[in-house]
Image: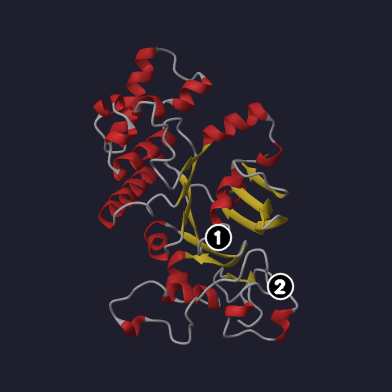
């Protein structure tokens, strides 16, 4: 099996029916996303709120129902998997959620929350094994095993997120989908949790899909980055290459939105992001056209496909680069 066969998304499409002002509308959250995650790799997905990055992560394990495309994990089509196979796949592909408090049951102890997947799937041969696994897993995320008897309200935000990570890694997964795992934390705690995730990646040989709106956070942890805008990937390359020389006008504006102590480091020619168009009134042609300084006549009629640009693996969805 080649690395490219590890986890692959092909033309993934996910939409939701919503009601606004008495009208039933369809929101196309993910609009034909194709990505691959190599074994042992961290792939970052970055973009503004509402760009579809979280829906991509949730669609992979069918927490959000995709309407088209495929998700193939080691030759298995996840979207076509039956209930028993899906339960097994959800042990191999685990998710860390954005809000560490909302993702934990306030009525369950920390130990019970961490052991939940093992309890459901009957993976503990004995009570003693269960207790030992909980203690070992809590220790691996930097928490004292005595925390097993506490409840979520007794922990800080950073400690609760460590519990969320422990719950994800206890079944010994192969892939972690981390959905904005540090956005709800203080800056100093963010660094600690990012360092923990990087350490666990090495220790447990994990592959990760790391989702964030903060491109500087993506720069710290990911090997490659996919930049998303209104449900589509607009730029894809090695993280360092994208950060050092962004090509798509949206990526350039996203980079300029990161506060910089030295104004000279801002990207010349990139405009401010401003307000995005409504998801319910998507522009015809290129979705970024109303905000783009490079927009041309072709952009008004034809949506650009993600295509190779240059000689080093960069792929960009723009008619004018």
- Residue at position x 53%, y 73% in the image: 275
The N terminus sits in image quarter: top right
Location of residue 96 by image quarter: top left
The crowd level at tag 2 (other Cα within 10 Å; few <14, some 14-19, many 20+) is some
- Residue at position x 59%, y 41% in the image: 61
Residue 198 vs 315, above or below: the answer is above
Residue under label 2: 303
Label number found at residue 209: none
Residue under label 1: 50
Q: Secondary structure at mark 1?
A: loop
Residue 114: image x %, image y %? 39, 29
Left or right relative to 320: residue 130: left
Outermost residue toward the front? 22
Left or right relative to 269: residue 293: right
The C terminus sits in image quarter: bottom right
Whichever of labels 1 and 2 marks the residue nearer the N terminus, that label is 1
Residue 26: image x %, image y %? 71, 56
Residue 223 vs 73, above or below: the answer is below
Disc 1 versus disc 2: distance between alpha carbons? 19 Å
- Residue at position x 29%, y 40% in the image: 159
Residue 262: image x %, image y %? 29, 80
**In the depicted view, which residue is nearer to us: 312 or 278?**
278
Location of residue 309 by image quarter: bottom right
């Amino acid at each position: 099996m080649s690395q490219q066969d590890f986890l692959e998304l092909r033309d993934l499409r996910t939409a939701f029916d919503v009601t606004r002002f008495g009208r039933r509308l369809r929101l196309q959250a993910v609009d034909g996303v194709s990505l691959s995650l190599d074994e042992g790799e961290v792939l970052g997905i970055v973009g503004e709120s509402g760009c579809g990055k979280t829906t991509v992560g949730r669609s992979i394990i069918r927490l959000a129902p995709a309407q088209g495309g495929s998700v193939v994990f080691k030759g298995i089509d996840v979207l076509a998997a039956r209930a028993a196979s899906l339960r097994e796949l959800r042990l191999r592909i685990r998710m860390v959620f954005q809000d560490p408090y909302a993702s934990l049951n306030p009525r369950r102890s920390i130990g019970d929350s961490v052991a939940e997947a093992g309890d459901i799937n009957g993976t503990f041969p004995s009570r003693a094994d269960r207790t030992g696994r909980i203690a070992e897993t809590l220790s691996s995320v930097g928490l004292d095993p005595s925390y097993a008897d506490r409840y979520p309200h007794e922990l800080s935000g950073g400690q609760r997120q460590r519990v969320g990570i422990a719950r994800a890694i206890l079944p010994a997964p192969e892939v972690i989908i981390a959905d904005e795992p540090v956005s709800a934390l203080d800056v100093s705690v963010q660094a600690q949790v990012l360092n923990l995730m990087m350490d666990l990646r090495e220790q447990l040989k994990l592959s990760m899909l790391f989702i964030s709106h903060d491109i500087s956070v993506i720069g710290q942890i990911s090997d490659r980055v996919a930049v998303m805008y209104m449900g589509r990937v607009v730029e894809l390359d090695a993280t360092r290459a994208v950060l050092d020389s962004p090509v798509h006008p949206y990526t350039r504006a996203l980079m300029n939105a990161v506060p910089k102590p030295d104004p000279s480091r801002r990207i010349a020619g990139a405009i401010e992001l401003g307000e995005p168009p409504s998801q319910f009134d998507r522009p015809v042609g290129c979705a970024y056209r109303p905000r783009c300084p490079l927009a041309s006549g072709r952009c008004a009629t034809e949506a650009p496909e993600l295509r190779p640009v240059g000689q080093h693996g960069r792929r960009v969805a723009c008619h004018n680069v």
